[in-house]
Amino acid sequence: MTTPAQDAPLVFPAVAFRPVRLLLISVGLTALAMLAAGLLGHLMVGVFFGVGLLMGLLNALMVRRSVYAITAREHPLKRSMALNSATRLAIITVLGLIIAYVFKPSGLGVLFGLAIFQPLLVASTAIPVYKKLRAGDPGPSAGPEGQAGTELRSTSDD
């Protein structure tokens, strides 16, 4: 007999989230954006682009923190994670829109930064996992059958 989805516990495998690497990539992208925007006479668009990337990184750090907190409970609920995510995304979206409106037209760079950060986050997490899978190395959180477990990784940034 299977457990209905709404009653199933939350299970998050260990992921290859490297905030320091993301910060360095974001700083590099911000420098490129500032250079390109400066050459076009709109330097502040590049600055706000960097602010958007920073907001995306802060969101990713808050996601990690909330996942650890929610999964540490005896009976973590998917509803808690969904409510947490919706609230956090609403706040970041409103902040991004306020910045874009107050500092228009340059403030729109914040929205571009937020938008670009998402595929950057996915790629920076998925590529190392994909490489490990191709190499046949299940990683430190593997169980006896080589499948990923649910152990939490250390909080170091590596």
Image: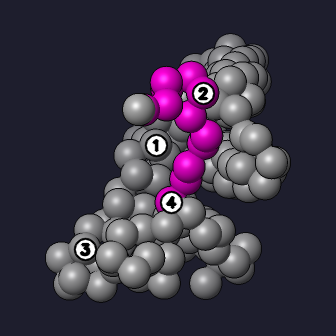
The stretch of residues the image draws in magenta is 2-13
Q: Amino acid at mark 3?
A: Leu
Work out whether residue 45 can be spotted.
no
Image quarter where the C terminus lies is: bottom right
Q: Which residue is mark 4?
A: 13
Q: Amino acid at mark 2?
A: Asp
Q: For numbered disc 4, what is the local secondary structure?
A: loop
Main SS of residues in magenta? loop
Residue located at (50% from left, 60% from top): 13
Q: Is residue 137 above or below residue 124?
A: below
Are the residues flagged by discs 3 and 4 in contact, CB closer than 8 Å? no
Image location (x, y in percent) of residue 77: 70, 33
Q: Which residue is mark 2?
A: 7
Are the residues flagged by discs 1 and 3 in contact, CB closer than 8 Å? no
Q: Amino acid at mark 4?
A: Pro
Q: For numbered disc 3, what is the local secondary structure?
A: helix
Q: For numbered disc 1, what is the local secondary structure?
A: helix
Are the residues flagged by discs 4 and 2 in contact, CB closer than 8 Å? no
Q: Which residue is mark 1?
A: 118
Was residue 69 drawn as part of the magenta stretch in this picture? Answer: no
**Corner quadrant of residue 116:** top left
Work out whether residue 115 can be spotted.
yes
Dot 1 or dot 3, earlier in sequence: 1
Dot 1 or dot 4, earlier in sequence: 4
Q: Which residue is mark 3?
A: 133
Dot 1 or dot 2, earlier in sequence: 2
